[in-house]
Image: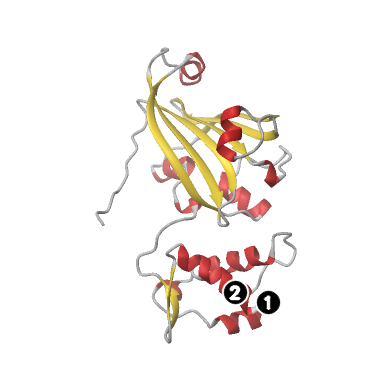
Amino acid sequence: MAYQIDSESKAPLHNKVEKMMRELIEQAAYRDGELLPKEVDIAEKIGVARNTVRHAIGKLVNEGLLVRKKGVGTKVAASRIPTRLDSWWSFTKEMKSRGIDVVNFELAVTILPASEEVATAMDIKQGTKIIEVLRLRGTASGPSLLTISSFHPRLKMTGRENFSKPLYQMLEEDFDVIAAISREEISAINADKTLASKFNLEVGAPVLFRKRIVSDTDGRLIEFNKVYYKGDGFSYSIDVKRG
């Protein structure tokens, strides 16, 4: 990989360097334990201050992706903690792995004032104009997943973005925003009239509900997301490692 940052991107310099470092440590040699180049060498190759490189490396160390030992150097952690959301499988990838084609039943993009719930979740003033994206997806057998995403006005979305792309891929490619942290709540609810209609269920049927707030690598809120899963179509598994 050539040491190069995106000169055309309008993102802050430290974000560009961080993005380059994330791509760098995905190389097989570094994942196999090879030490990363010294900070000063990386800085000279890409033409930035050493402190900017140090900031990027420090962030990856804090996330558990890198290990830095004084007098030795920096290398990829043997047991990496996945923090970028694109390391989690999307619904489309999950279905593809099973040889199932995803069907998009509905896509609606709306500019609307933030509700009290959305405003509280994203720490903005109620009534602030935001972009909301509703996606109803499933398989040939019918709809099984309803996603409603509200985006922070800081992103300055227009509503004309390509939401047919995987969401976090689009944010990174088009806005230089890397989704890094997700705080989630999962519960079981009963389908109201709207959900029952979307999923072809009876009112009161069980539905799995997931609510999450997503932040970028700087801890800034970027998305408030609500997902509804058809109860007979999904299970949610979690691996828990004893500390």
Report the number of numbered marks: 2
Nearest the viewer among 57 and 124 is 124
| Spatial separation of the CA atoms under disc 1 and disc 2 | 8 Å
- Compared to residue 188, the image places residue 7 above or below, namely below
Q: Are marks 1 and 2 in contact (CB under 8 Å)?
A: yes
N-terminal label among 1 and 2: 1
Residue of label 1 = 48
Q: Which mark is residue 161?
A: none
- Residue 80 relative to residue 123: left or right: left
> Which residue is the extreme one toward the left?
242
- x 57%, y 34%: residue: 120
Up-down relation of residue 8 to residue 183 (above or below): below
Position in image of residue 100 (x %, y %)? 43, 38
Q: Position of residue 199 (x, y in %)?
A: 46, 21
Q: In x, y percent, where is residue 81? A: 40, 60
Q: Nearer the viewer, residue 27 or 151?
A: 151
For residue 233, which quarter of the picture?
top left
Give the amino acid type for the residue marked by disc 1 in the picture.
Val
Hey, which residue is sitting farthest bottom in the picture? 71
As shown in the figure, which amino acid type bears the numbered disc 2?
A: Val
Work out which quarter of the rendered image holds the N terminus and state it: bottom right
The residue indicated by pointer 2 is: 53
Mark 1 Cα shell of 10 Å, populated few (<14), some (14-19), many (≥20): some
Q: Residue at x 58, y 57 (%)?
A: 218
